[in-house]
Image (tube, rainbow, N blue to C red):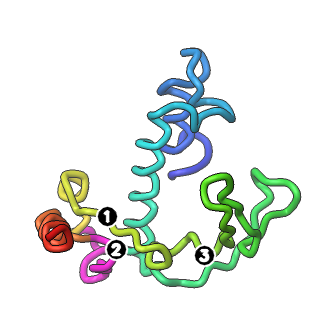
Amino acid sequence: AIEGGAGMHGSVHVCIGGGWTGGHMGDYWSPDDPIFFLHHTFIDYIWAVWQDCYDYDGVLPGSITTDMFEPLTDLTTALAFTPLTGATHQVQDLLDLQNYGISYEKGPFWSNAGVDTHPACQGNINPAWFVNGNRRRLQNQISNQ
């Protein structure tokens, strides 16, 4: 599991630069640690692979959580991106990669994890979400000319 207990999300916060090491990865200041962004980029990638393989890409979300946020947070809660832009976005708008132009490059993890041969993923890969590395480099070269 990604979350909860010994999940890969929380474990990294505690075991790499958190808790007993004196780093910030285990507390509310974890975004002050550069490893935070590397870690969360990978968690987002794993989440996107799962969403895509199990056909959740583009599905409208419909859940509520009280686990971490008070008062009750639902998917229509507005998140403010200040002081960076001042823009606000609803939580539900940030769950689909297509809403904000993100795509991931298939790479060594993709190959080593056997994503293409996993029964849930065969034929379900969204080409707007996951691109081959050569295609991405070619697109960048064309756009930079």
Q: Mark 1 and 2 residues: CB-CB less than 8 Å, in contact?
A: yes
Assess disc 3: are there few (<14), some (14-19) or many (≥20) residues with their C-alpha within 10 Å of its C-alpha: some
* Residue found at the far top of this picture: 21
Name the residue tied to disc 1.
104
CA gap, disc 1 and disc 3: 18 Å
Camera-nearest residue between 41 and 5: 41
Q: Could you tell me which secondary element the residue under label 1 belongs to?
A: strand
Screen quadrant of the C terminus: bottom left
Q: Residue at x 61, y 30 (%)?
A: 26
Front residue (pair 112, 103) = 103
For label 1, count other residues whose C-alpha is less than 10 Å away and answer few (under 14), some (14-19) or many (20+): some
Task: Say which amino acid is labelled 2.
Answer: Trp
Q: Amino acid at mark 3?
A: Asp
Span colored in magenta: 118-130
Q: Is residue 121 magenta?
A: yes
Q: Is 91 covered by the magenta stretch?
A: no
Residue bearing the label numbered 2 = 129
Mark 3 to mark 2 CA distance (whole Å):
16 Å
For image coordinates 56% across by 40% down, the residue present is 10
Amino acid identity at mark 1: Tyr
Q: Is residue 31 left or right of residue 128?
A: right
Residue 7 placement (x, y as % from top left): 53, 44
Q: How many marks?
A: 3
Q: CA distance from mark 1 to mark 2?
A: 6 Å
Q: Residue at x 64, y 74 (%)?
A: 92
Tell me which numbered mark, 3 or 2, is placed earlier along the sequence: 3
Q: Is residue 18 above or below residue 10?
A: above
- Residue 125 location in percent, x, y? 29, 78
Badge 3 is on which residue?
A: 93
29 or 3, which lies in front?
A: 29
